[in-house]
C-alpha cells in the first residue's frame, strides 16, 4: 500500500509533535476540541488524514453511496503534515470530527490525554466481530477502545520468479534455513548474487532494513519478545535482537549474495528501494524483500505479478515450518466528536460493507474478517488478505512505527545504514539503543 511510504517518512514529525505537546501542556484542556456529547449531527462529518491524491479520491468514492443513503456529507481533508498538525489542532480546539491515524502510538497519545472519544458501542461490536485481538489492541488504551482498524498492509514478502525457480530446481522455502539453502543453490548455479536490496529513501534511507530486522525478531524470538522489544523492556543490545541482525547478515552482508546488478554490499544504501523492481521484473535479480505494495513497482517496471506470472512472492519463512507471523502497517480511525452523525460514520468505516467497497476500488487491503478477498484487484493483495484473515496468523504492527521517533525513524534507520557500511553489529546496536528517550 503505497501511502505507507509517506507515513514512514513523516514519522519523526509525528513524534516531535507528541513531545512538543507534552512539554507545552494543553491550553484548552483535554476534551476542549470535542462536540457536545450525544448531540445531534448537522449532516456534515469532517475526516482528516494522510491518504492523498488518487488514494484520497478512491477513499471518497468508497463512501459516496453511503453518504447519499444516510444524508451525511463526509468532508475529507488530506495533509502531508497530518502527524504534526493533528496534535496541534486537537490542542487548539480545531480538531476534525474523525482522524485516520497511520500510527497507533499517535492515536494512543491523544486518547490517553482525553482528546479522543471512546468508540461507540456499535463500533466496538464491529471491531469484535470483524477484527482480531491483535488489531483491536492497537486501538485500545487502558482497556477502552478508542480507534477502529481501517486498511492494512503486509510487510515481509520475498519476491521471486516462479519460472526461474523451476529452471534452477528450487522450491519456495518453508523455513529460514531453507531460504538460505535456496540462496546458496541459486548463487552456485548462476554464479551471480541472488539478492538485490535498496535502502535508499532520501531522508528516510535505512527503513527497508528495519523491516527486515522486525520480520526476523518476530519469526525467531516470537511475539512476546517482539512486544517487549518495541516497548524497550528489552534493549537493542539483547541477544534476541542481535540474533536477528546476525541472521540478516547471512544474506545482506555476504558479498556473494548481494547486491545483484548494483554492486557490493555497501551499494545497498545508495540504491533507491523502488529501483530494485526493475531487475526483479526482468529476471536479473532472483530475490528481494519488500512489502505488499511492491507489486505496483513491479508492474511499473514492466513485469506481471501472479503465481504463474513474471514475479510472485512468499512470506519470509519462520525458523520452524508452519509458522505464520507477519509484520505490517495500517490505519486506525478515532473521533474527537461523538455526535450522532460522527458515530454513524465511524460505525460504517468499521464495517465489512465499507471494507468491501474500498478494497473493490483497488490498490489497498484490509484485515477485516468480513472482507471478500476476491474484491482485491491483484493476486498479491488477495494473498495478503487471506494471510491477514487467517486465525493462525500472528500480526504485529511495524516496530519502528511504534517506537519513539528518535529511535524508530532516527537511530534505527541510521543504524541500518551504518551496519551495511561495515560498522560492527554490537556497536550499531549500542548506538541505536542510545536513541531511546530517558523518560
Image: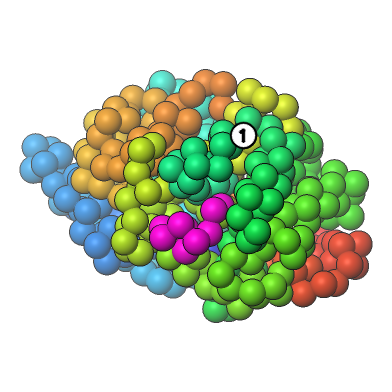
Q: Residue at x 72, y 54 (%)?
A: 251
Q: Which residue is mark 1?
A: 173
Residue 379: percent from the left, percent from the top? 34, 39
- Crowding at mark 1 (Cα within 10 Å: few <14, some 14-19, many 20+): some
For this rendering, which residue is in front, 159 or 229?
159
What span is colored magenta in the figure? Answer: 279-287
Q: Residue at x 69, y 73 (%)?
A: 264
Q: Is residue 343 magenta?
A: no
Asked whether residue 275 appears in the rendered view, the answer is: yes
Q: Is residue 285 magenta?
A: yes
Residue 194: percent from the left, percent from the top? 61, 56
Q: How is colour applied across the structure in the image?
A: rainbow
Asked which quadrant contains residue 297, the reply is bottom left
Asked whether residue 30 appears in the rendered view, the answer is: no
Q: Is residue 97 above or below residue 373?
A: below
For this rendering, which residue is in front, 188 or 62?
188
Element under disc 1: loop
Q: Is residue 291 above or below residue 279?
A: above
Residue 284: percent from the left, percent from the top? 50, 61
Q: Residue at x 61, y 55 (%)?
A: 190
Quadrant location of the C terminus?
A: bottom right
Q: Residue at x 29, y 38 (%)?
A: 376
Q: Is residue 142 above or below residue 88?
A: above
Amino acid at each position: 500500500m503505497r501511502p505507507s511510504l509517506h507515513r514512514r517518512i513523516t514519522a519523526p514529525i509525528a513524534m516531535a509533535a507528541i513531545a512538543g505537546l507534552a512539554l507545552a501542556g494543553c491550553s484548552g484542556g483535554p476534551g476542549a476540541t470535542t462536540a457536545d456529547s450525544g448531540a445531534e449531527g448537522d449532516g456534515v462529518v469532517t475526516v482528516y488524514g494522510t491518504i492523498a491524491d488518487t488514494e484520497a479520491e478512491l477513499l471518497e468514492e468508497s463512501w459516496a453511496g453511503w453518504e447519499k443513503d444516510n444524508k451525511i456529507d463526509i468532508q475529507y481533508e488530506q495533509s502531508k503534515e497530518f502527524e504534526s498538525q493533528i496534535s496541534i489542532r486537537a490542542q487548539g480546539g480545531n480538531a476534525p470530527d474523525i482522524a485516520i491515524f497511520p500510527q497507533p502510538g499517535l492515536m494512543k497519545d491523544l486518547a490517553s490525554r482525553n482528546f479522543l472519544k471512546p468508540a461507540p458501542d456499535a463500533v466496538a461490536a464491529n471491531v469484535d466481530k470483524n477484527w482480531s485481538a491483535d488489531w483491536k489492541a492497537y486501538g485500545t488504551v487502558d482497556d477502552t477502545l478508542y480507534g477502529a482498524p481501517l486498511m492494512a498492509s503486509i510487510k515481509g514478502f520475498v519476491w521471486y520468479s516462479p519460472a526461474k525457480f523451476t529452471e534452477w530446481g528450487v522450491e519456495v522455502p518453508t523455513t529460514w534455513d531453507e531460504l538460505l539453502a535456496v540462496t546458496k543453490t541459486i548463487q552456485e548455479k548462476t554464479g551471480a548474487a541472488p539478492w538485490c536490496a535498496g535502502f535508499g529513501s532520501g531522508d528516510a534511507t535505512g527503513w527497508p532494513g528495519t523491516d527486515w530486522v522486525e520480520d526476523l525478531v518476530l519469526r525467531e524470538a516470537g511475539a512476546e519478545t517482539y512486544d517487549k522489544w518495541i516497548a524497550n523492556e528489552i534493549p537493542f543490545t539483547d541477544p534476541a535482537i542481535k540474533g536477528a541482525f546476525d541472521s540478516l547478515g547471512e544474506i545482506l552482508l555476504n558479498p556473494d549474495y548481494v547486491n545483484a546488478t548494483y554492486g557490493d554490499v555497501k551499494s545497498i544504501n545508495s540504491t533507491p528501494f523502488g529501483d530494485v523492481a526493475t531487475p526483479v521484473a526482468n529476471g536479473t535479480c532472483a530475490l528481494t524483500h519488500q512489502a505488499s505494495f511492491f507489486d505496483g513497482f513491479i508492474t511499473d517496471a514492466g513485469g506481471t505479478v501472479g503465481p504463474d506470472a513474471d514475479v510472485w512472492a512468499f512470506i519470509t519463512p519462520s525458523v520452524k515450518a508452519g509458522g505464520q507471523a507477519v509484520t505490517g502497517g495500517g490505519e486506525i480511525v478515532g473521533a474527537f466528536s461523538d455526535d450522532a452523525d460522527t458515530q454513524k460514520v465511524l460505525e460504517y468505516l468499521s464495517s465489512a460493507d465499507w471494507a468491501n467497497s474500498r478494497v473493490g476500488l483497488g490498490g489497498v487491503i484490509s484485515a477485516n474478517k468480513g472482507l471478500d478477498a476476491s474484491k482485491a484487484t491483484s493476486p498479491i493483495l488477495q494473498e495478503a488478505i487471506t494471510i491477514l484473515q487467517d486465525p493462525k496468523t500472528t500480526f504485529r504492527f511495524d516496530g519502528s512505527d511504534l517506537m519513539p521517533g528518535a529511535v524508530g525513524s532516527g537511530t534505527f534507520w541510521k543504524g541500518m545504514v551504518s551496519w551495511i557500511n561495515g560498522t560492527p553489529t554490537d556497536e550499531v546496536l549500542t548506538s541505536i539503543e542510545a536513541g531511546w528517550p530517558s523518560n
